Amino acid sequence: MPSHGRDEGSIPSNSNVPMKKEKIRDEVIGWLGAFLIIAAYIALSFKFIDSSSLWYQGANAWGAIGMIYISFKKKNYQPGVINIIWMMVALAAIYKIFF
């Protein structure tokens, strides 16, 4: 009887377990980035914070970093490039806050 590419007596390998953990980690980083950007926008829109606050700019910078990470990890470059620009604007604003 044909084996269809499987060894009849072999035990399934757990070699994909680290890959699953890595994929989960990557997704968490991406979703945290999205959450930070959305939370910053909501807080600004409802006037809980000011656009010149360190929290707002920091949330945008860290959120963009998370989005850049997952975008390039998935080889989805357009959102990655947009978020590089988003991060640069946030970092420039943070610089302006301190100097």
Image: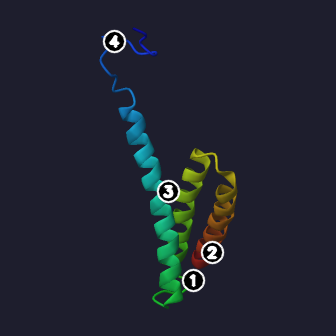
* Disc 3: which residue: 30
Q: Secondary structure at mark 1?
A: loop
Tags 2 and 1 touching, CB below 8 Å: yes
- Using the numbered discs, state the Cα–Cα distance from disc 2 to disc 4 in whole angstroms: 62 Å
Q: Residue furthest bottom?
A: 47
Residue 17's place in the image compared with 59, above or below, is above
> Which numbered disc covers residue 26?
none
Instruction: Say which of 34 and 51 sits in front.
Output: 34
Query: Spatial distance from mark 1 to mark 3, Cα to Cα?
Result: 25 Å
At label 1, the amino acid type is Ser
Q: Residues within 10 Å of mark 2 (few under 14, many from 20)?
A: many
Please provide percent x and percent y for residue 10. 32, 13
Locate the N terminus and report the quarter of the image it occupies.
top left
Q: CA distance from mark 2 to mark 1?
A: 7 Å
| Mark 3 neighbour class, 10 Å CA radius: few under 14, some 14 to 19, many 20 or more | many
Pointer 2 residue: 93
Q: Nearer the viewer, mark 1 or mark 4?
A: 4
For image coordinates 46% across by 52% down, the residue present is: 27
First in residue order: circle 1 vs circle 3: 3
| Front disc: 1 or 3 | 3
Q: Amino acid at mark 2?
A: Ala
Secondary structure beneath label 3: helix
Mark 2 vs mark 1: which is more N-terminal? Answer: 1
Is 85 placed left or right of 53 in the picture? Answer: right
Say which amino acid is labelled 3. Answer: Gly
Counting from the top left corner in percent of width and height, residue 24 is at 41, 47
Q: Nearer the viewer, mark 2 or mark 4?
A: 4
Residue 52, numbered circle: 1
Against 79, residue 86 (above or below) is: below
- The tag earlier along the polypeptide, 1 or 4, is 4
